[in-house]
Amino acid sequence: MSRDERADGPATSATASGTAYGTPPAFEAVGLTRSYRLDGGVLVDALRGVSLRIGQGEFAAIVGPSGSGKSTLMHLLGCLDRPTSGTLRVNGVDVATLDDAGLAGLRNRTIGFVFQSFHLLARTSALDNVALPLVYRGVSRAERRERARAALEAVGLGHRLTHRPSQMSGGEQQRVAIARALVGDPRVLLADEPTGNLDTRNGEEVMGLLERLNEGGVAVVLVTHDAEVAARGRRQIHVRDGRIERDT
Amino acid sequence: MRTAEALRMAVEALRVNRLRSMLTMLGVIIGVLSVVILVAIGTGAKNAVEKEIAGLGSNIILVVPGQVGLGAAPTQSRLDLSDVAYVRRVVGDPSKVTVAVNSGEPVRVGRVEVFATLTGTDENMPHVFDRPLRRGRYLSETDVDTRRRVVILGSEVAAKLFGDVDPIGRQVTIAGVRFRVIGVYETVGSTFGVARDQEVHLPVTTAQRLIGLPRINGIAVGASGPDEIEPLRRRVVAALDARYPGETFSAVTQTQLLGTIGTVLGMLTGVLAAIAGISLLVGGVGVSNIMLVSVRERTKEIGLRKALGARGRDILGQFLIEAVLLTTIGGVIGILTGVGGALLIQAVSPVPASITWWSIALAFGVSAAVGVFFGVAPARRAARLDPVVALRTD
Ligand SMILES: Nc1ncnc2c1ncn2[C@@H]1O[C@H](COP(=O)(O)OP(=O)(O)OP(=O)(O)O)[C@@H](O)[C@H]1O
Ligand SMILES: [Mg+2]
């Protein structure tokens, strides 16, 4: 099902660099599978051989029915999980060669995550939530705060620095989460249904933000159920039954 | 991740669950508190006994017939004054050898009667023992040779019999015989339950006549220095063994007494500390328990931190520091209350308590170790969580 040539598609501003020597694509997957063994011993094949290539700076939407394996694929791309078989290169690095600490470093430096349910620390201010990834990079407290403030300002929340998640709207919370994903200057942003818990207006705001970031050069891969949201992706990867059904 | 950062997060986590943290600490506090107090009491008792022994004088060897030891039956003495002369020849310096004949008799002045420990001894007693006089004089050679009926009173006996009156030159009656008081000792306290201020000293010869037996109870030898003690002890025992083949004589030194008593009290302190240590262990189990709860509650947070780049050892460190912080804060509170408790016991009760720096250092070290030991399992559980699974839990 490999459609590697898609990386040369018209949608990506960084297509040229994605194919040029020296700058590998953001993701390059060959024959990825992921099986889960249930308690009874039954094997569930969530992914059954996915090959794809996502260039630097691309904007791609992963769509597909529930249970088709979208989240599983996102977790693999985001190095939160390891494939059962197949190879995955992130920015040219074969993840199989990395140990758990190496994967953590990769997540910390090159990948930003946005989750459907925000996943903010409840008792922590927006500023400290956003600064969290920098903690694991050994950045000093003062610099962390400075960069977190800048990231919050970039998502239009410069006036919400000390607010806690419970004191913010869903849209604001997701923007805090996006600021957190951005604060470490990642090269790719992975978002699993970022608008799934938001109303139309807030969803629109978040999508606009992601598009702006993409224009700034960050590759964005998002999972969505929403056809309208998917349509905004210049590339749509349709997943069904653990396989890529269509990649346009 | 930096330790300072992990520490800050741990403090925050403990602050969020303030009551729970306090209750968990309580287990550690009680454990450390009891270790500090019990060790203080044990050490205090040991110090008190050692001070009593040292109070006897320095470098003393006590020679008694039979086997000396805890639980050994007292032996009928067959030593007499000729043996004292013999030991004097063995030792070489006669003034460093003195003698004791013991008995208990009521001592009377007019209508006042006091039960006292009678000790027959000689003019060399002050050369061997440390027994300062408050008034009057020690026994003289003539007192012993001529069986003078003279006594030196312990300070308590003197106070009971004479009150504020100066006893020197006055008469006391012992077993119907009149004695003249020639001296009064300084207050020295008691040794091994022997109230030395309730003693009455008289010439050994006079004492033997009073008791009606020519025997003596023991010989005391004073060595000229600490290094001199052991060789002298061996020489005296060997000489007596040669003089009385087939019989046993024992010579105990202060060092031996200190050693034996030190061992016994040290063991006692150890047992007390071990019992207290068990409660510290129980406190540690409580820490482990609460840390497991904490890991479970924060599974999602752990998953998130991992997704954002925390390594297994960052998470491990965070939870270990949290556990160690719990136990060391508990340990410090326990040490403070323990020291306070020991000082209180010292002040309001006759139990001696002596706070030692090592018990405090140990208590602190052990509470930190308890944190590591009991925190490791929960922290490892946290560190090993699969981020995908952890993020999915609710
Ligand atoms: N931890 C797991 N253990 C067992 N099976 C799993 C596990 N995670 C996912 N699966 C299975 O793998 C398949 C794909 O799941 P996945 O979460 O990737 O779907 P999805 O496309 O994200 O669905 P949705 O749109 O509902 O979020 C499903 O059949 C799911 O039941
Ligand atoms: Mg999903």
Image: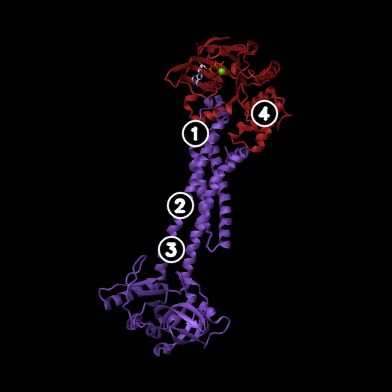
Chain colours: A red, B purple
Which mark identifies residue B381? 1
- Residue count near mark 1 (Cα–Cα under 10 Å), binned few <14, some 14–19, many ≥20: some
Q: What's the amino acid at mark 1?
A: Arg
Which mark identifies residue B274? 2
Is the C-beta separation of discs 4 and 3 under 8 Å?
Answer: no
Q: CA distance from mark 4 to mark 2?
A: 49 Å
Label 3 secondary element: helix
Residue behind mark 3:
B262
Left or right: where B85 falls relative to B355: left
* Image coords of residue A79 (percent x, y): 53, 24
* Image coords of residue A55 (percent x, y): 57, 17
* Image coords of residue A140 (percent x, y): 63, 38
Foreground pick, A147 / B202: B202
Q: Are marks 1 and 4 on the same chain?
A: no
Q: Quadrant of the C terminus of chain A?
A: top right
Q: Earlier in the sequence, mark 2 or mark 3?
A: 3
Mark 1 chain: B
Q: CA distance from mark 1 to mark 2?
A: 30 Å
Q: Is residue B347 above or below residue A2?
A: below
User: Which of the two marks, 1 or 2, is nearer to us in this view?
Assistant: 2
Residue behind mark 4:
A165
Q: Is residue B370 above or below residue B127?
A: above
Q: Earlier in the sequence, mark 1 or mark 3?
A: 3
* Point 55% across, 38% down: residue: B318
Q: Earlier in the sequence, mark 1 or mark 2?
A: 2
Q: Visible in this render: residue A61?
A: yes
